[in-house]
Image: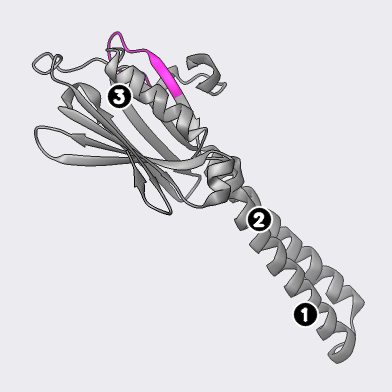
């Protein structure tokens, strides 16, 4: 299961601790790009149609209509390309000692969220499937709550393809000792798993 979940590419750049091994690299489901692309496409068609009406009935100028169409197409393609790039550079990485979220949007923002797993007392994993369609394609949000000595922290993996398989994988890795626990609590790690749905909660 490990090899099928790791995405292609050299991700060892994220491994900065001694004796650390890469376990998992995941992105959000590609279908999350569908709705933004659909909205952008509809808006582009609407504005091109409006431009056609303006330059056909009110201000007759085929050349201006052609230039306006090219401009609108260029803007829509730029927005779609940025959406794809933002999706591609938003990754979740699991190692034997860390859980990492990296979200990079070129020229605009960079977000990093790291959890050191050897500082965790117990872990609660919640699987949230929103709607019937997401249940069919096995797309869901995985909410991981870590109880650390300093404070409680939540880590959310949004719109994950194969969410049920990934929850099983995470639970097995945490319980089987493949992830390094703190020396003082290595025999006390506790893991809970709950699945949430639109209709309720099942344990």
The answer to whether 174 is drawn above or below residue 39 in the figure is above
**Which residue is outermost to the bottom?**
58
Disc 1 to disc 3: CB gap under 8 Å: no
Q: Report the mark closest to the observer, 1 or 3.
A: 3
Tell me if mark 3 has few (under 14), some (14-19) or many (20+) residues whose alpha carbon lies within 10 angstroms of its own. Answer: many
Of residues 126 and 180, the one nearer the viewer is 126
Chain-order first, disc 2 or disc 1: 2
Residue 110 image point, x, y percent: 40, 43
Residue pictured at 46% horizontal, 26% vertical: 25
Q: Which residue carries the number 3 mark? A: 98
Chain-order first, disc 2 or disc 3: 2
* Secondary structure character of the magenta stretch overall: loop
Q: Is 128 within the magenta?
A: no
**Residue 201 is at least partly visible in this image:** yes
Residue 56 image point, x, y percent: 89, 84
- Region of the chain picked out in magenta, as a range: 14-24
SS at mark 1 in the image: helix
Residue 38 in which image quadrant: bottom right
Q: Which residue carries the number 1 mark? A: 50
Residue pictured at 51% horizontal, 52% vertical: 131
Could you give the CA–CA distance between mark 1 and mark 3, rounded to whole angstroms?
52 Å
Q: Which residue carries the number 2 mark? A: 37
SS at mark 3 in the image: strand
Q: Position of 4 compared to 25: left or right?
A: right
């Amino acid at each position: 299961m490990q090899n099928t979940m790791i995405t292609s590419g050299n991700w060892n750049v994220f491994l900065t601790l001694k004796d650390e091994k890469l376990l998992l690299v995941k992105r959000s489901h590609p279908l999350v790009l569908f709705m933004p692309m659909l909205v952008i496409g509809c808006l582009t068609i609407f504005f091109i149609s409006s431009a056609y009406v303006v330059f056909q009935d009110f201000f007759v100028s085929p050349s201006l209509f052609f230039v306006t169409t090219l401009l609108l197409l260029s803007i829509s393609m730029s927005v779609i390309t940025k959406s794809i790039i933002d999706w591609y550079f938003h990754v979740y990485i699991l190692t034997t000692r860390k859980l990492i979220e990296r979200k990079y949007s070129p020229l605009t923002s960079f977000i990093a969220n790291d959890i050191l797993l050897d500082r965790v007392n117990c872990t609660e994993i919640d699987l949230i499937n929103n709607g019937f369609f997401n249940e069919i394609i096995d797309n869901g949000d995985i909410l991981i709550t870590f109880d650390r000595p300093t404070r409680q922290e939540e880590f959310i993996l949004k719109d994950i393809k194969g969410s049920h398989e990934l929850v099983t994988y995470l639970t097995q890795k945490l319980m089987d000792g493949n992830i390094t626990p703190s020396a003082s609590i290595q025999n006390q790690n506790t893991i809970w798993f709950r699945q949430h749905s639109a209709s309720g909660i099942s344990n």
